[in-house]
Image (cartoon, rainbow, N blue to C red):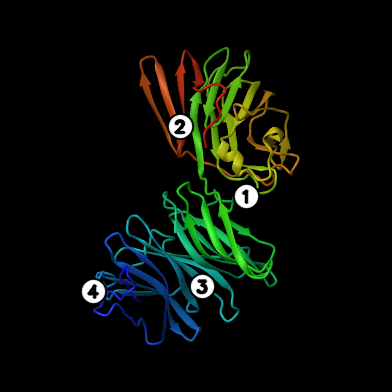
Amino acid sequence: MVRYNTDGSLDTTFNTTGIVTTPIGSDDDTGQAIAIQPDGKIVVVGYSGYSDISYDFAVVRYNTDGSLDTNFNTTGKVTTDFDSNRDKGRSVALQSDGKIVVAGEVVLSYPKDYQHYGVARYNTGGSLDTTFNTTGKVTFDFSGNSCYAGAVALQSDGKILVAGTSNPGGWDQEFGIARLNSSGSLDTSFSSDGQVTTGFGGNFEYAYGNIIQTDGKYVVVGTTDASGYDFAVARYLTGSTTVSGQAGVGTGGTAIIGSTNVMAKFNTGYACTSGVVTVTKALNYPGGSSNPGEMPMYWNISNDCGASAYSMDLSLCYTDGELANGNSVTEANLKLYRWSGSAWVQQVGTVDTALNCVTMSGVTSLSSWTLGDPTTGGPTGGPTAVTLSSFSASAEAETQQTLWVLGALGLVAGLGGGALMWTRRARQKHGS
């Protein structure tokens, strides 16, 4: 490891020479990635072992002067074996609580060369974090094929994004992206199974680097041989799930329940006499990937109103940003789709481009709903469960103020006079 001054000269305050080398074991040691802690300490990850036959993840922490930090595993060094074969740490990310996340490749059935993604998480003192998959480490593959991780990044909510290379079959290689919950399990709110693959039209495509934008989008960079070897860059949505909460809907006439970008209006004569309506929203493509004609969200709507039958006007609305992230969609062509239990079924509906909404009257069946453009394909795949993210309520005079929040998006609903109304500025598009 080498540290330079800003003018390019060696920094002699670092190990007196500006250079430091560190043996991990008695054989081959290779550093692959580096991160700087807020206190200035330096974390280096890689692998240590023998002649590409048996390697382990290796993590070393240095003080700011280049000396080994003996507060880290007493020696400043730690190695981690997954299955007594070829384990190589390739990337590192630091959590806000100081824990260290390392991702790389793990061979579980050598010499068959069956590579997996491997992720390990360490406590600040260098021990494996047993709150992560109970062992501090986890391995997984893509559809039973060889794969390996090359980059890792952390979302602000603690979820872990891992990018690398997957093998869909034969000799082909393509980007493989996975998202883990903080516990180490695959996050099924990301592309329905926690994983997504991306091809660029070539045979050999490898992901090497990644970064999370300030808006939460995930950018991955690598190479493709689609036309010679070129840069390959892909950007992914990383929206999580949210829910509006549950709300009572009044005892007569008309009631409205609002969630983020949804209006469900029970028509006169069909209002709920008791119970609640629940609306949830998932910020993912319904089919689990960016299929043509899909918008990047869907809603689950249900009720236990106690009414034997109902009829409502349903409006699904979208932000300008969501429209921009729709895959091959034209706003004027958007239609409502309802999940039948086995497929998305196109419904009638009217687009209001000023309000960014599509509205359908006479809805008599609630389930999962989404928006899509039938001229380019429309939604595919099926919805997954979503859970409550943020819900709060407070009483103000005779009005109950209820707030549902998703990141920078939110809406305020007030409950008064037995009816829940959605507050909205008329004829104004939602912001992105």
What's the distance in space between the residues labelled 1 and 2, CA to CA? 25 Å
- The label on residue 404 is 2
What's the distance in space between the residues labelled 2 and 4, CA to CA? 52 Å
Residue at point 23%, 74% (across, down): 13
Residue 177 x/y as whole percent? 56, 59
Residue 430 x/y as whole percent? 54, 31
What's the distance in space between the residues labelled 4 and 1, CA to CA? 51 Å
- The label on residue 13 is 4
Circle 3 sits on which residue? Answer: 106
Residue at point 26%, 70% (across, down): 63
Q: Secondary structure at mark 1?
A: loop
Closest to the camera, between mark 4 and mark 1, is 4
Residue at point 45%, 38% (across, down): 408
Residue type beneath disc 3? Val
Relative to residue 388, is residue 190 depicted above or below? below
User: Considering only order in the chain, which callout, 3 or 1, is on the residue closer to the N terminus?
Assistant: 3
Residue type beneath disc 2? Trp
Position of the N terminus, as image quadrant, is bottom left
User: Considering only order in the chain, which callout, 2 or 1, is on the residue closer to the N terminus?
Assistant: 1
Relative to residue 207, is residue 18 depicted above or below? below
- The label on residue 288 is 1
2 and 3 marks in contact (CB < 8 Å) = no
- Judged left or right of residue 1, residue 107 is right
Residue 262 x/y as whole percent? 57, 29
User: Considering only order in the chain, which callout, 1 or 4, is on the residue closer to the N terminus?
Assistant: 4
Q: Is residue 384 visible?
A: yes
User: Residue 382, located in which quarter of the rendered image?
Assistant: top right
Residue type beneath disc 4? Thr
Relative to residue 110, is residue 375 depicted above or below? above
Q: Few, some or many C-alpha atoms within 10 Å of disc 3 (few <14, some 14-19, many ≥20)?
A: many
Residue 27 x/y as whole percent? 41, 87
